[in-house]
Image (cartoon, rainbow, N blue to C red):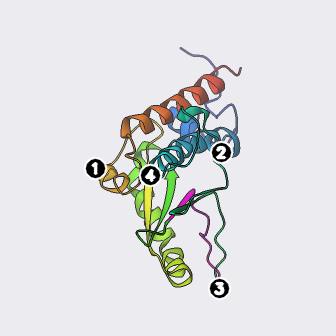
Amino acid sequence: MKLNIDPKCRICQSFDETIDHIVSGCKVLAPTEYTERHNKTASYSHWKVCKHYHIPTEDRWYNHKPEPLAENENVTILWDFTVHTDKTIGANRPDIIVKDFTKKSCLLIDVAIPSERNTSKKIFEKLSKYKDLEIEIQKMWGLKTSTIPVVVGALGLIGKEFEKYVQHIPGNINAEQLQKTVLLGTAHILRKVLSIN
């Protein structure tokens, strides 16, 4: 159209403005918009876990504000909690930690919303990232520990193994609800960014 338009992102001015960049690659949006979308998605999982263990919470998941600590006699659920270990570990703060004392198990649930092309890579990243923490928790708390990656692409893509992982989360997590939450967050980001002149 012979228009002199700068292709750089209107927010960060560092990379070309593509949908992929706006929804998952802009460093300026990361601490605010991406974090809000991530937290909303993680809070759905937290709400389902609380419901499963009969911990009092909101009737509707979107009204749920996760408490740092939720517990009863059978379980302790930690939200965004830093685990202090004897050995220094870089990755020691998963989104949700579920300590089930009756099953003598501990789940480290971590949510990620990468670009579509990075979903498989992000799953592997999460599993390897928390391996040291799994070992330390098993030693400290005496609970069999495993990591559950909850990875949904910014445009709703889920991998083939998604169901295999989320079925281990107590509370019967609904994949469609997770996708819908991510997509609504992405739509909000796109509307906001594309309305800026």
Q: Amino acid at mark 3?
A: Asp
Q: Earlier in the sequence, mark 3 or mark 1?
A: 3
Q: Position of residue 158 (x, y in %)?
A: 36, 44
Q: Earlier in the sequence, mark 4 or mark 3?
A: 3
Mark 2 or 1, closer to the camera: 1
Q: Residue furthest top?
A: 1
SS at mark 2? helix
Say which mark, if any, is on residue 30. 2
Local packing at callout 2 (Cα closer than 10 Å; few below 14, some 14-19, many 20+) is some
Q: Position of residue 52 (x, y in %)?
A: 44, 49
Q: Earlier in the sequence, mark 2 or mark 1?
A: 2
The kind of secondary structure the magenta stretch mainly shows is loop
Residue holding disc 1: 160
Residue holding disc 3: 86
Compared with residue 20, is residue 52 higher up or lower down, i.e. above or below?
Answer: below
Mark 4 or 1, closer to the camera: 4
**3D distance between C-alphas at marks 4 and 1:** 12 Å
